[in-house]
Image (cartoon, rainbow, N blue to C red):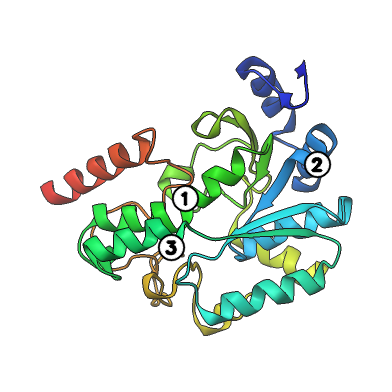
Amino acid sequence: MTITDSVVFDDLEIGEIAVDLDDQEPEDVVEWALDELGDRIAVVTALQADGMVVLDMAARIRPDVRVVTVDTGRLPQQTLEFIETARKHYPRTRWDVLAPDSAEVEAMVRERGDDLFRTSVADRMRCCQVRKVRPLTEALRGLDGWFTGLRRDQWASRAAIKKVELDHDHGGIVKVNALADWESQDVWDYIEEHHVPVHPLYSHGYTSFGCAPCTRPIQPGEDDRAGRWWWEKGAPKECGIHCPIETGAFEHEAEEIIARSAGA
């Protein structure tokens, strides 16, 4: 580790740390990250169950932990209200509610329409990029690490995540996926045991949610992310923050999945 104003790890160091932490409990992983990165790590969350569990774990260790979320301008009213619920439940946490660049949103809407995400996968990715990914990417530039609620069982693109890894798509900062080896039931068991606030949309059949027009409740037998961009056939259920468009990784994954779907 290089001692500067920022905390910097190289791939070898973080690889060794990831091996050491792989069989550790999520709380231990969270504690390690807070000890190492201090005020330069934040919980990044869309207020879903996984992210709320990570926030709860972090706030129990460091009550004034930083929390980052994005108001895309298309969020359900329930989410906007739940942000305030979470802030009151964790009164010492320091929140940064981001917003997209208004001029960039206006230009996109003027060119492609307010509901461009319905027209093609590429347009949907662009909408996610402008409204969510770019504000988050800009916020991450000021951090040395971020906590996510990612789990390996959520989606194919997440199956190989480590509990701690370098995020080269966001400047080589540390990405902490403390719940990586948990399953859905583990999350809900923790929520019940620790009385973690739960987003009200879960009680209406939602299992994953983002912007209001891009999310619906799932149907019986569907996987947890089936309610995201449900009109798309064979496209990845990602907004781009975890497979960034800037590096091409997201587009390459999308092209491969779409091609396989078309050839089926």
Give, as a three-letter code, the residue at label 2.
Asp
- How packed mark 2 is, by other alpha carbons closer than 10 Å (few <14, some 14-19, many 20 or more), is some
Give, as a three-letter code, the residue at label 3.
Arg
Q: Are marks 2 and 3 in contact (CB under 8 Å)?
A: no
Q: Quadrant of residue 70?
A: bottom right
- How packed mark 1 is, by other alpha carbons closer than 10 Å (few <14, some 14-19, many 20 or more), is many
Q: Tell me which label, 2 or 3, sits earlier in the chain.
A: 2
Q: Residue furthest left?
A: 263
On screen, residue 108 versus residue 258, left or right, reads right
Q: Tell me which label, 2 or 1, sits earlier in the chain.
A: 2
Q: Which residue is mark 2?
A: 39
SS at mark 2 in the image = helix
**x, y percent for residue 216:** 40, 76
Instruction: For residue 232, say whether it is visible.
Output: no
- Alpha-carbon distance for marks 3 and 1? 19 Å
Q: Which residue is mark 3?
A: 225
Q: Identify the residue at horizontal 72%, vertical 60% (top origin).
A: 95
Q: Which residue is mark 1?
A: 133
In this view of the protein, which residue sits in the foreground, 141 or 93? 141
